[in-house]
Amino acid sequence: MKTLLAASIALMLTGASFAQTNNSGSTGGSGNDGNPNYLTGPNIQRFYQDDTMTTMKSAAEMKAEMDAMTDEERASLATACESNQDPKFEELCLSMRTN
């Protein structure tokens, strides 16, 4: 009985550790570190007119922001948009592809 209880506890603890990582094995992150969470990082605000990130900047402003980004930032944003499943960022990702 003790062995069964010990095995059950071990399985529960193992399951909890798997729940803390995403598909890439990392625990998340944001910004321009190349992971798909670039969309939730601090640099994403540059594409919106308001703090709630509900209103996109104009096409000319979007292009200017894209041009001001480093190649690494553009690559990180492109990678994030390829795997994006959040409707909040659909418009941004679509506009990023057209610029």
Image (cartoon, grey):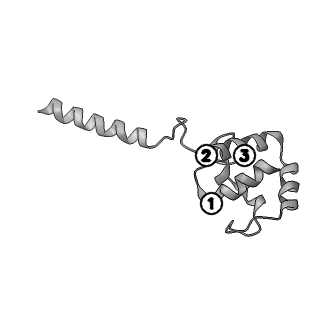
Residue 75 horizontal/vertical position (percent): 75, 40
Between 68 and 97, the residue placed more toward the observer is: 97
Quadrant of residue 59 within the rendered picture: bottom right
How dense is the environment of label 2, judged by Cα within 10 Å: few (below 14), some, or many (20 and up)? some
Q: Which mark is residue 29?
A: 2
Between 47 and 19, the residue placed more toward the observer is: 47
**C-alpha span from label 3 to label 1:** 15 Å
Q: Quadrant of the N terminus?
A: top left
Residue 22 horizontal/vertical position (percent): 51, 41
Residue name at image x 29 percent, y 35 percent: 11
Q: Which mark is residue 88?
A: 1
> Residue type at mark 1?
Lys
Q: Is residue 62 placed above or below 52 in the rendered structure?
A: above
In the image, taking residue 57 as reference, residue 26 lies left or right, namely left
> Residue type at mark 3?
Leu
Residue 97 horizontal/vertical position (percent): 76, 48
